[in-house]
Amino acid sequence: MKRLAFPKSFAHRCRAIHQTTSKHCRETQQLQSAGSVASLLKSRSVIRFRGPDTIKFLQGLLTNDIRKFGEPIGEETANVPTPNVPAATIPPIYAALLTPQGRFLYDLFLYKPPKSSTKLDRTGTGPGSDPDEPFDLFADVDASVLDELLQTFNKYRLRTKVEIDNVTNDFSCWQRYGPGPPKKSSHVEEPEAASVGWGAGVDRTAMSASHGGNLGWQWFKDPRLACLGFRGIFPSNTIPPLIEADKETDEQNYLLWRIEKGVAEGSTEIPKGEAVPLEYNLAGLNAISFDKGCYVGQELIARTHHRGVIRKRIVPLRFLDNDGKEVVNKVIPGSEVINTALGKKAGMVTTVIGCHGLGLLRLEQALKGSDTLSIQGQEDVKVVASKPDWWPSEWLQDHH
């Protein structure tokens, strides 16, 4: 498959830093004008939870309400009938596992695969059936912490009837994004997003790509924000549907797309064992349920939420010189951001890609007179912080 000509190099913490400002600008403009593109997310791995106690097990651990996966499918999750998609599906859930002290450990995108009774069989003539079909949930997780993540879940498993397996060799995570996907908020999948294996009698290409047991995988609206596009896990031996031949591009461009919207992902950008989830906007990204009951680390989350004021948040950053031109290769994650007018620390850079980044900043300094922000020890590098469009207004009411 022909790919868009974007750079492929990654750095471990900041993923990539472009070599020249002009080159970075060209690539940003190319991404913006390319329309909808898709990236294989090599930074994510896929695991599977299997067993009758799966929902109970995860409900007591994760920040979001996992019981939705056990509820009967209703109108809100029913799809628009078409010959090439399942009759009804459950949208994915974004959630996190915390330390007992309420600090972030891992994020997970959870998917419930369709049952045999809701999808066409291999002949495309009707639903299949399997009375002994196990209960499965799949999750895409940060690949860099996969082994310790599995160890952590197994530590909590004890005698619970749930198996946790690494299925990364069989499944891959993809993101479809760009100016093309609609921005209206909806938690159900895109009706026209043809899945692998649905409507085999109509779509022979989907049928041939989904031979064996790999039936029924599809794109879903990203459960965090509509502006992030679509996300899904697909069999590793297939290219997901709706990816045009010249529209597969490097994961680095998804990173740039996401960072410009002020969204951190994974246990590097959201520092494992340190990050306060509400400061990294996980509530606004639909990762936290405040009425689900107890889970690991809930006490700090509830106390912070009910106190009502979050003084620091993760925000998108741009790095400029004194003439207002974008600069690269001068800022690294961990750099301190200072308010030169007040002589005070405003926060810290957490992620860098080219002249863009994310930073955990005090809001009263980040969003008021941002022209006074610079990098500690590099006062010639100016920092411009911005408020993402998706932020709710109440996040700012105490900082005007």
Image (cartoon, grey):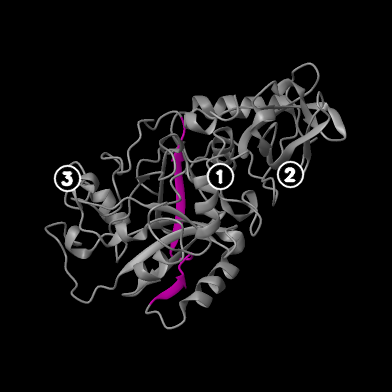
Question: Separation of disc 3 and disc 2 at Cα?
Answer: 48 Å
Which quarter of the picture shows residue 371? top right
> Is 199 included in the stretch rendered in magenta?
no
Q: Where, by quadrant of the figure, is residue 137 drawn?
A: bottom left
Mark 3, Cα crowd under 10 Å, few <14 / some 14-19 / many 20+, is some
Residue located beneath label 1 in the image? 251
Does residue 19 appear anywhere in the picture? yes
Magenta stretch secondary structure, dominant: strand
28 left or right of 11? left
Residue 239 lies, in percent from the top left, at 40, 50
Q: Which span of residues is magenta-colored?
A: 162-178
Residue 165 sits above or below residue 21 on the image:
below
Q: Earlier in the sequence, mark 1 or mark 3?
A: 3
- Looking at the picture, which amino acid does disc 2 mark? Pro
Q: Secondary structure at mark 1?
A: helix
Estimate the x, y position of residue 244 in percent, counting from the top left. Answer: 40, 37
Under tag 3, what secondary structure? loop
Residue 83 badge: 3
The verdict on residue 169 being magenta is yes
| Residue matched to label 2 | 333
Q: Amino acid at mark 1?
A: Glu
Real-space Cα separation, disc 1 to disc 3, in angstroms: 32 Å
